Amino acid sequence: MYRVHPQTIRVGELLREGAIGEPLVVSAEFRFAADRDGGTFRTDAAVGGGGLRDVGGYCVSFARMVAGEEPDGAHLAAFIGSAGYDEWATGTLGFPGGMSACFATRVHVNLRNDAWIYGEAGSIGITSPWKCEPGSKLVLRREGAEPETFELGTDNDTLYGIEADAVVEWLEAGECPHMTPEDTLGNMRALDALRRSAGLTFARESRG
């Protein structure tokens, strides 16, 4: 849903305008608080629970969107608890064009849930990049200029309403330009590369 939200669209516009020059580094965090007693797929290792395949997908998606290409290097340092899922992890992605990304994802640890893009001539910071909450600030810092702040946050119903509107708008075309099927597959490939690097596997995966 965040990929079709006006806040994310504005980030893409700023990058295409060259507002911060060439993007070189992305830093992103996303976490949620899960009950250790189970009862939810988020802490069920058999079906892919844990941070990476849930909130980590947002961080990876964001980095790939900024880079505009697929990573050629991926590494994940994950704490895999006794229940078999990644309770917290930090990851890095390298891209052919030279951009690098670092991210953190947690199930049981507090994080800021923000994202930053650092470029040759400035930076872009987003206080609520994933849920795009009311009060979220997108801050553009151009080298030698005063910061510019955009407040594009919405409530939760509007967030998912925008996603539904995007489905309606692009249904006949067969794909949405803000999140194409190939983009989705690229994200899954990157996530698989990250978890391979950490030795993270799930019991119900096909072995064929």
Image (cartoon, rainbow, N blue to C red):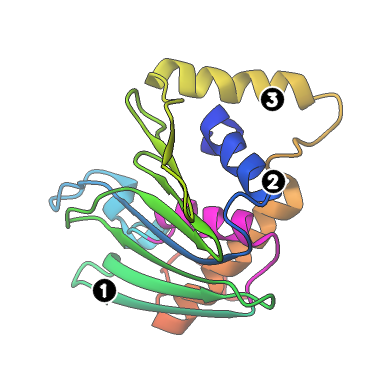
The type of residue carrying mark 2 is: Glu
1 or 2: mark nearer the eye: 2
Mark positioned earlier in the residue sequence (2 or 3) = 2
Give the quarter of the image for residue 193. Answer: bottom right
Q: Which residue is mark 3?
A: 167
2 or 3: mark nearer the eye: 2
- Residue 17 marker: 2
The type of residue carrying mark 1 is: Ile
Q: Position of residue 98 (x, y in %)?
A: 62, 77
Are circles 2 and 3 on residues that touch, CB within 8 Å?
no
Q: Residue furthest front?
A: 144
Q: CA distance from mark 2 to mark 3?
A: 27 Å
Observer able to see residue 130: no
3 or 1: mark nearer the eye: 3
Secondary structure found at label 3: helix
Q: Residue furthest left?
A: 37
The residue sitting at 54% across, 70% down in the picture is: 192
Q: Position of residue 96 (x, y in %)?
A: 68, 78
